[in-house]
Image (spheres, helix red, strand yellow):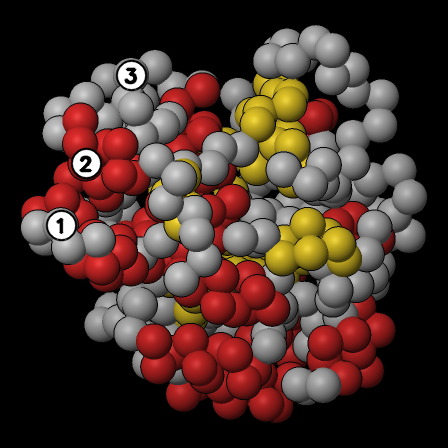
Amino acid sequence: MHLPLDLKGATFEQVAAFVAELGERPYRARQLYRWVFARDAASIAAMTDLAGSFRTRLVGLCAISRLRLAHQHLARDGTRKFLFRLQDGEAIETVLIPTEGRLTLCLSTQVGCKLACDFCRTGEGGFARNLTPAEIVDQYLAVQREVLAPGGEKITNLVFMGMGEPLDNYADFVQALRILTAPAGLHVAPRRITLSTAGLVPRMEQFGREGIPVKLAVSLNATTDEQRNRLMPINRSYDLARLLQACRAYPLARRDRITFEYVLLGEVNDTPEDAQRLCRLVQGIRCKINLIPFNPFATSLYRGPQPERVQRFLDILVAGHCTATLRESRGVDIEAACGQLRTSAPGLAEAAPLALHG
Ligand code: SAH
């Protein structure tokens, strides 16, 4: 075990093992876990109901890391985007999206991304590194702590649709899920968590065997291998047939469905033929299709689809008995929408932290 142990990145079982190694009683593990996650303690010293002698032993052996909130932006529609500065100077973005009856947090799993999808801004900047489990989990704690009033609104849903490919940071992502869902800590219900993947097929299969019943979303975005190869280079490793086979075989929770995300790129993949092919491709898979009109950014090669074409696309899916919904773009004016996140934020004065830009 690395010392000091960062409690924020440890599963309950790891904390229990650590406490046992110290020769302390098992209930100590539960106390520590509660302090770190349920009570968001900033330090060992803050754990005031732990015996002084126990606290003294812990100092030096464990620590509690914290993300630094460098900046936040508020969009006209109430969406908020946070820029967190990491220990090594890298930065990530996290997005909080209020919708009726829900408060959804969109989390990042990597600094940048390796997959280089042609239409996604995160991929443009390349890949820097994986986030640690603590950095993944703390996005949730930090937003809850810094933005939401104590006893007030609570984050209800988590979606792994921010920067990075969760399954490309497999071990850390799975560890973060175990921490987020631990009954002794944050206890987020798995059905309130969605993993979104570009389709790393072997990892999807592996994840299916972990037995963590979070929801699965798959970014499809194209209906032929030729087009998907161009838009999403990962398709050259795992083509549509393999991906859809993995989806068919995925051990879904009872009454659950896979969500297929489909970014509509104007005049590229938004034709009636695409809609018909999409319908055929997903035949026999318990699923719904989520259409996402492309969110443009300064350097993007693509444009958003015309509203009539979106409607036509949707009509064809419905006529083909596919369940389909249209994702409303949120936070576009502050570049917080799908595919608009990146690691640097030029022009943001860090000297004015926590400023809200409406
Ligand atoms: N790597 C994961 C999660 C991050 S992307 C994945 O690929 O699923 C989250 C979603 O945003 C994906 O469905 C992706 O296709 C979509 N997306 C990326 N760039 C976009 C853009 N510019 N406009 C709209 N959606 C975009």
Q: Secondary structure at mark 3?
A: loop
Q: Foreground: 149 or 100?
A: 149
Q: Which residue is mark 1?
A: 24
Tell me how far mark 2 sits from mark 1, CA to CA.
Answer: 9 Å
Quadrant of the rendered structure where residue 75 is?
A: top right
Picture disc at residue 92 = none
Q: Foreground: 240 or 107?
A: 107
Are the residues flagged by discs 2 and 1 in contact, CB closer than 8 Å?
yes
Q: Secondary structure at mark 1?
A: loop
The residue type indicated by label 1 comes to Glu
The residue type indicated by label 2 comes to Phe
State the count of labels.
3
Horizontally, residue 111 falls left or right of residue 102, namely right
The residue type indicated by label 3 comes to Pro
Picture disc at residue 150 = 3
Q: Foreground: 59 or 111?
A: 59
Quadrant of the rendered structure where residue 110 is?
A: bottom right
Residue at image location 22% in from the left, 72% down from the top: 254
Spot occupied by residue 343 in the image (x, y as percentages of width and height): 74, 41
Horizontally, residue 210 falls left or right of residue 86, namely left
- Is residue 101 visible to the viewer in this orientation of the structure? no
Q: Which residue is mark 2?
A: 54
Quadrant of the rendered structure where residue 153 is?
A: top left
Q: Quadrant of the C terminus?
A: top right
Spot occupied by residue 63 in the image (x, y as percentages of width and height): 41, 39
